[in-house]
Amino acid sequence: SQQGEEDPQALSIQEGENATMNCSYKTSINNLQWYRQNSGRGLVHLILIRSNEREKHSGRLRVTLDTSKKSSSLLITASRAADTASYFCATGTQGGSEKLVFGKGTKLTVNP
Amino acid sequence: KAGVTQTPRYLIKTRGQQVTLSCSPISGHRSVSWYQQTPGQGLQFLFEYFSETQRNKGNFPGRFSGRQFSNSRSEMNVSTLELGDSALYLCASSLVLNNEQFFGPGTRLTVL
C-alpha cells in the first residue's frame, strides 16, 4: 500500500523558476527520503531527512518535514531542463528494516 | 566504487514461464531490497535481505521469492508468470540501516 502521496501529480514550469512538491504520509516514520527517476530508469537518492529534523538543504534542494502534519515538501530552486524527471518521496518506518514505502510521484517538466 | 548492477536489463517471457533476476549490491553493502514498479501500482516493496536472511516481505503472492548469497548478491524468482507481472524490477542496497538506499538501473520484464 502507498503511504506517501505526492502533490501535485504533474508540474510544468519554466527554466529558472522554483518547483515545489509535497508529500503526505500516514504512519510514524523514522526518516523520509526523496528520490528522482528519469524516464523509467533507476532511482537516484536526493536527500534524507530524519524524523527529528525539520529542514535540510542540499545544493538547490530544500526539504522540510512536519511530523505533526505528517507532511514533507521538496523545493528545487532555479530549476533547469535537466531537472525534468519524476520525484518520489519514500518513508522509512521504525524497526529493523530497510523497507521504503513510496508515493506515486510527481512528474516535473522544466521547459527551456 | 561500482554501483548496484542488475542483470538482465530487459527480459521477455510468456505466461506460465518462470524468471530469475540478479542483483549485485555495492561492495560492502549487506542489505538488498527489491521493488516492483508498474504504472498502475507505482513502486511496491517486494522483500529485503540482510546477511542471507529475509528481513521483511511485502504483500506479494508466493510466486515471488528471493534469496541472498554469502557475497551479498541477491536473486529474485517469479514462477508461473502472469501478464500483470510485467514491470520494472528495481534492486537497492544500503550500508547502514535507515539510511539512503542505492538503486540499480532495473530489469524491465515483459510478459506476453
Image (tube, coloured by chain):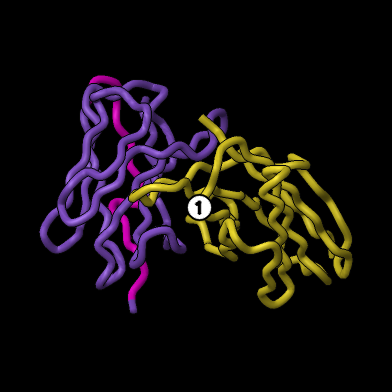
Chain colours: A yellow, B purple
Q: Which residue is drawn at 17% across and 47% down?
A: B53
Q: Which chain carries label 1?
A: A
Say whether residue B9 is magenta. yes
Q: In which quarter of the image is residue A73?
A: bottom right
User: Residue A69: image x %, image y %?
Assistant: 73, 43
Say whether residue B103 is magenta. no
Q: In which quarter of the image is residue A110?
A: bottom right
Query: Which residue corresponds to mark 1?
Result: A30
- Residue A110 lies left or right of residue B98; in this view the side is right
Q: Residue at x 66, y 55 (%)?
A: A85
- Residue B105 lies left or right of residue B25; in this view the side is right
User: Residue A41: image x %, image y %?
Assistant: 50, 54
User: Residue B80: image x %, image y %?
Assistant: 23, 22
Q: Provide the secondary structure element on which disc 1 rests.
A: loop
- Residue A98 lies left or right of residue A93; in this view the side is left
Which of the pair B18/A23 is nearer the observer? A23
Q: Which residue is drawn at 40% across and 51% down?
A: B106
**Does residue B65 sit above or below A108 in this rendering?**
above
**Does residue B1 sit above or below A14 in this rendering?**
below
- Residue B35 lies left or right of residue A22; in this view the side is left
Q: Which amino acid does label 1 sit on?
A: Asn
Q: How crowded is mark 1: few (under 14 residues within 10 Å), some or many (20 or more)?
A: some
Instruction: Let me know if residue B62 appears in the view.
Output: yes
Tell me where the magenta segment starts and ends, as one range. Answer: B2-17
Q: Quadrant of residue B94?
A: bottom left
